[in-house]
Image (cartoon, grey):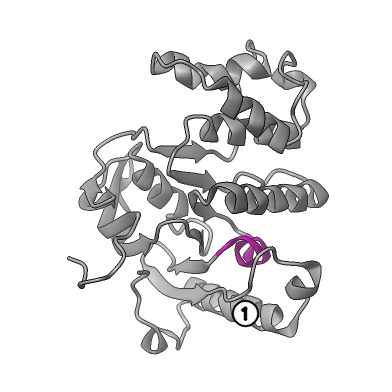
């Protein structure tokens, strides 16, 4: 329950626990993970490899059920894929036999909805893909495919966009370009975004807050505020303040990975 006058979180994870049953026994991926994302906020989730970041994100999307706990959207439990939540995966996952236009039209066909042509054309123009509608995925670069995936995810106007390390396979120049694109799209739409990344610099560039997960089983270990105004210029990203924040997050992750950390007592382990 929220205190009087408090803003209701757009997305809330309460006590998320996930156990996978494997051939070699049960695997505890998440344990009692609790966090909240406020309306119009960008939150990045980082942590040691294998800590459950993708499991947490997929649970938020409704694609994976939880063993215990729940995820709420606007205070309503998510029990399966939700029309108000879009997701961009690590791979663009465009259908190779469909051109770009038909790939973007696909979710509308599944939902038996009329495509909003004006909105889709605006998005294509916004991401620099106008005129590429008849091109097939094999004719597009990796960056262009991910741009198309972002357009597809936003085409249904979700209020929440989940992004599962979508730029990890791109070269550094294209990745930086895509980060700026996400920042610009957010400034246009103010869509609530949860972003999974292994890059601390990427998390700081994009986010209002950075959530650090512990090593498996994943729990919220610490939350860092990112107090820099947008758009975040190269001067800001090269500043001592960003350098210090990067090192603090890195120290938290390394400590969590090795089991040596002294920060738990300094910060509540709940992202709210």
Indicate left or right for 187 with 240 as reference.
left
Q: Which of 248 and 159 is in front in this view?
A: 159
Residue 201 visible to the viewer: yes
Left/right of residue 8 with respect to residue 149 in the rendered view:
left
Looking at the rendered image, the quarter that the N terminus falls into is: bottom left
- Residues in magenta? 199-207
Pointer 1: what residue?
A: 245
Q: Establish if 190 lies above or below 145.
A: below
Mark 1 is surrounded, within 10 Å at the Cα level, by few (under 14), some (14 to 19) or many (20 or more) other residues, namely some
Quadrant position of the C terminus in the picture: bottom left
For residue 15, which quarter of the picture?
A: bottom left
From this viewpoint, is residue 93 visible? no
**205 inside magenta stretch:** yes
Percent x, y of residue 90 = 58, 40
Tell me if residue 52 comes above or below residue 81 in the rendering: below
- Secondary element at image label 1: helix
Decide whether the magenta segment is chiefly helix, strand or loop: helix
| Residue under the point 53% across and 53% down | 195
* Residue 138 point in image, percent of width and height: 75, 20
Residue 253 placed where, x, y %?
53, 72
Q: In the figure, is residue 68 to the left or right of 105?
A: left
Q: Quadrant of residue 30?
A: bottom left
Image point 27% across, 41% down: which residue? 65
User: Measuring 60% from the left and 14% from the top, which residue is drawn there?
Assistant: 102
Where residue 148 appears, x then y in whole percent?
65, 30
| Image side of residue 53 versus residue 137, left or right | left
């Amino acid at each position: 329950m929220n205190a009087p006058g408090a803003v209701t979180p757009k997305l809330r994870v309460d006590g998320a626990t996930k156990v996978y049953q494997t051939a070699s026994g049960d695997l505890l991926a998440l344990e009692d993970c609790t966090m909240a994302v406020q309306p119009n906020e960008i939150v990045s989730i980082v942590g040691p490899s294998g800590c459950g970041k993708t499991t947490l994100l997929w649970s938020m999307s409704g694609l994976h059920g939880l063993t215990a706990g729940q995820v709420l959207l606007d205070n309503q439990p998510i029990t399966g894929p939700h029309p108000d939540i879009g997701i961009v995966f690590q791979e663009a996952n465009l259908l190779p036999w469909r051109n770009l236009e038909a790939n973007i039209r696909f979710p509308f066909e599944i939902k038996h909805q009329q495509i909003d042509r004006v909105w889709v054309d605006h998005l294509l123009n916004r991401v620099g893909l106008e005129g590429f509608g008849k091109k097939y995925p094999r004719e597009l670069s990796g960056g262009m495919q991910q741009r198309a995936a972002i357009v597809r995810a936003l085409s249904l106007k979700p209020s929440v966009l989940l992004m599962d390390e979508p730029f990890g396979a791109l070269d550094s120049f294209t990745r930086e370009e895509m980060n700026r694109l996400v920042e610009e799209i957010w400034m246009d739409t103010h869509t609530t975004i949860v972003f999974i990344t292994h890059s601390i610099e990427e998390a700081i560039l994009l986010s209002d807050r950075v959530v650090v997960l512990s090593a498996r089983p994943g729990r919220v270990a610490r939350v860092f505020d990112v107090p820099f105004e947008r758009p975040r210029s190269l001067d800001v990203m090269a500043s001592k303040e960003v350098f210090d924040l990067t090192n603090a997050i890195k120290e938290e992750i390394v400590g969590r990975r090795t089991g040596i950390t002294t920060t738990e007592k300094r910060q509540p382990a709940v992202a709210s």
